């Protein structure tokens, strides 16, 4: 079995690459060097692969200057379009393209399943919509699966270590009002969800989020309890605005992405609730020390 992964050096990509290699898959990693190749050379790397997993994109939680907005947009949309173009030049077409997306496409109101058409209108939602539109240019016989990913929790990488640090320093608390919703998923469930999609050749849109969505205030309480620390403080919205400008909206707003399709199609979450997820991740972290 052969997989091609763009963004294979990133947090999710590196974990997925390691998992596939543990199953004796051949994994081709695409980075900046490969995307600077001639299109025919890039397409040669994809020949006859079982799946292309498109995860490329610079971090979106940053100050949204004009330059950073351009990088955020182009690192996702231009990369995806180049993948699609290279696929057209392959002789033996890839069986499946799994293209990453984000729950940031949804509006802040309601519970959003994959059939929801209530989308946000800000910069992040615009990027995500164009990212998905670019992926939809892939042609038959390659199947397309778009996965809208929430906040991925891992004990060592991603958002959780950053979220835990203030609590370890006894200054943890809500971000802004604390009312914004958090759609999250344990890293192990994320990898398992990818394998479910690959092994069963699913296509269409999937929310890669835990069914146990919570508010920022609720995850604050859960982290404080797991670390045996207080949660008295609040990070004011205006401080985040000073640090991130318009990018602060990612931290002060939130959406509910509900994994309706995964649940209906038989996928079982090992960590559907935040308490169990944190307990597992912190246990693994302590064992590694």
Image (cartoon, rainbow, N blue to C red):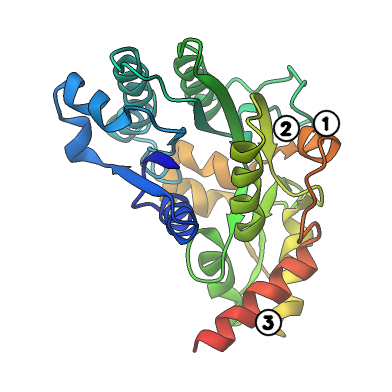
Which residue matches tag 2? 108
Which residue matches tag 1? 110
Give the crowd class for mark 2: few <14, some 14-19, many >=20 residues within 10 Å: some
Query: Alpha-carbon distance for marks 1 and 3?
Result: 31 Å
Closest to the observer: 260 or 26?
26
Tell me if 61 is positioned left or right of 167 in this view.
left
Residue 146 makes an appearance in the image: yes
User: Which residue appears at 45% of the width and 46% of the height?
Assistant: 61
Image location of residue 203, percent across then percent down:
64, 24
Q: What numbered label is drawn on residue 275?
A: none
Image location of residue 19, percent across then percent down:
49, 58
Tell me if 111 is positioned left or right of 13 in this view.
right
Query: Alpha-carbon distance for marks 2 and 3?
Result: 29 Å
Above or below — where is 27 with respect to 90? below
Which residue matches tag 3? 227
Closest to the observer: 185 or 224?
185
């Amino acid at each position: 079995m052969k997989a091609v992964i763009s963004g294979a050096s990133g947090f999710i990509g590196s974990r997925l690459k390691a998992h596939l290699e543990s199953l004796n898959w051949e994994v081709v990693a695409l980075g900046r060097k490969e995307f600077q190749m001639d299109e025919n050379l890039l397409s040669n790397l994809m020949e006859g692969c079982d799946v292309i997993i498109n995860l490329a994109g610079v971090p979106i939680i940053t100050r949204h200057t004009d330059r950073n907005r351009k990088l955020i947009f182009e690192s996702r949309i231009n990369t995806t379009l180049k993948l699609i173009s290279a696929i057209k030049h392959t002789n033996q077409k890839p069986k499946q393209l799994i293209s990453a997306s984000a729950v940031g496409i949804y509006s802040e109101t309601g519970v959003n399943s994959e059939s929801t058409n209530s989308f946000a209108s800000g910069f992040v939602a615009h990027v995500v919509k164009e990212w998905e539109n670019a992926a939809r240019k892939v042609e038959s016989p390659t199947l397309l699966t778009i996965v809208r990913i929430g906040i991925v929790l891992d004990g060592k990488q991603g958002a959780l270590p950053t979220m835990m640090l203030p609590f370890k320093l006894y200054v943890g608390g809500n971000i802004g009002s604390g009312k914004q919703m958090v759609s999250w998923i344990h890293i192990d469930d994320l990898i398992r969800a990818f394998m479910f999609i690959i092994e069963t050749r699913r296509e269409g849109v999937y929310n890669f989020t835990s069914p146990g969505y919570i508010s920022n205030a609720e995850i604050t309480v859960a982290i404080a309890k797991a670390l045996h620390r207080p949660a008295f403080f609040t990070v004011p919205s205006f401080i985040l605005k000073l640090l991130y400008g318009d990018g602060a909206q990612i931290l002060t707003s939130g959406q509910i992405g509900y994994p309706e399709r995964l649940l209906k199609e038989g996928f079982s979450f090992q960590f559907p609730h935040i308490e169990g997820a944190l307990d597992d991740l912190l246990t693994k972290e302590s064992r590694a020390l």
